Amino acid sequence: MFTADAFIDTVQTGKKTWVNTFVSNETVKDAMISFIDAQADYTKKAAKVTSDAVTTIASESVKVIKQAGQFDYAKFGEGIMKAYGDMQEKAVAAYEKTASKK
């Protein structure tokens, strides 16, 4: 299975190889290797946190979708029709009240 750590290690190893091959000053070389190690550590942590966040979001999304599938459309429709009926009655009463004044 592919893991981000393996890819990160491959890239960072390539950087270290380049530094070891082309940088002759030991002080500079050590500083660059230390920087590359810090990059690797940070990138691995960022990849793990991102992976954990994606897993959590996907899991919660599945829960929400399951809950949406359990929605009682008939009950919702009855509520809408009742609200519509109530509004209709109020509108008729208001019209009749206005019409009787004329």
Image (spheres, rainbow, N blue to C red):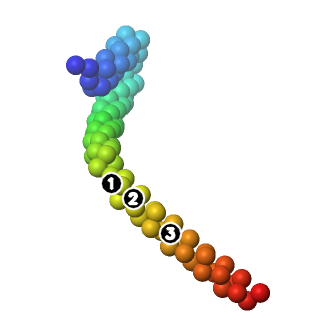
- Left or right: residue 78 versus residue 63 is right
The residue under label 1 is 72
Task: Name the spot of residue 12 as percent of width and height, x first.
Answer: 34, 21
Task: Name the spot of residue 37 as percent of width and height, x first.
Answer: 31, 29
Whether residue 3 is visible here, answered yes or no, is: yes
In terms of depth relative to the viewer, which is nearer, 27 or 36?
36
Q: How many marks?
A: 3
Residue drawn at (70%, 87%) of the image: 100
The residue under label 3 is 85
Quarter assignment of residue 101 = bottom right
Q: CA distance from mark 1 to mark 3?
A: 20 Å
The reply to whether discs 1 and 2 touch (Cβ–Cβ < 8 Å) is yes
Badge 2 local density, few (<14 within 10 Å), some, or many (20+)? few
Residue drawn at (26%, 24%) of the image: 3
Q: CA distance from mark 2 to mark 3?
A: 14 Å
Quarter of the image with the C terminus in it: bottom right
Mark 3 lies on a secondary structure that is helix
The residue under label 2 is 76
Could you tell me the amino acid type at mark 3?
Answer: Gly
